[in-house]
Amino acid sequence: MSEQPAPAARQQLAPDAADGLRAYAARTRESADHLAAVLEDIAANGLPAVEDCTPWEELRETHLARLAAQRPAVA
């Protein structure tokens, strides 16, 4: 049998970093739950009609505008 080295001790996070990581995990979980709900709806009811959909170009521009608003202006 081969001997495996003992696992290294884990470095604890600062409380603020741990809280930030938990918040990120919660947002990620919420996004995943939303995506799962959309996919389940498509599986149960089929794809929506094209007339009811938003073109991807509009979605892209909306998202880019949101990102630009979050980013501070560079002089």
Image (spheres, rainbow, N blue to C red):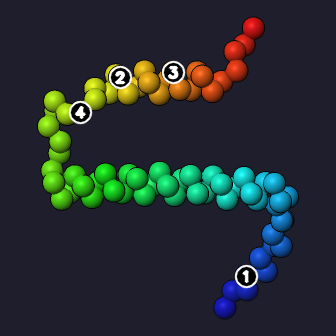
The answer to whether the residues at label 4 and label 2 have Cβ atoms under 8 Å apart is: no
Asked if 5 appears above or below 38 in the picture, the reply is below
Q: Nearer the viewer, residue 7 or 47?
A: 47
Mark 3 vs mark 1: give the one in front.
Answer: 3
Disc 1 target residue: 4
42 left or right, relative to 63: left
Mark 4 vs mark 1: give the one in front.
Answer: 4
Disc 4 target residue: 53
Quadrant for the N terminus in the image: bottom right
Considering only order in the chain, which callout, 2 or 3, is on the residue closer to the N terminus? 2
Q: Nearer the viewer, residue 39 or 69?
A: 69
Quarter of the image holding residue 11?
A: bottom right
| Numbered disc 4: secondary structure | loop
Mark 2 neighbour class, 10 Å CA radius: few under 14, some 14 to 19, many 20 or more: few
Which amino acid is tagged 3?
Ala
Considering only order in the chain, which callout, 1 or 4, is on the residue closer to the N terminus? 1
Q: Residue furthest top?
A: 75
Q: Which residue is rendered at x = 49% and y = 55% of the image?
A: 30
Disc 3 target residue: 65
Query: Distance from label 4 to label 1 (Cα)?
Result: 55 Å
Which amino acid is tagged 4?
Cys
| Numbered disc 1: secondary structure | loop
Disc 2 target residue: 58
Query: Distance from label 3 to label 4 (Cα)?
Result: 20 Å
Query: Distance from label 2 to label 1 (Cα)?
Result: 54 Å
Considering only order in the chain, which callout, 4 or 3, is on the residue closer to the N terminus? 4
Q: Nearer the viewer, residue 61 or 7?
A: 61
Mark 2 vs mark 1: give the one in front.
Answer: 2
Q: Please give the count of numbered marks on the rendered protein.
A: 4
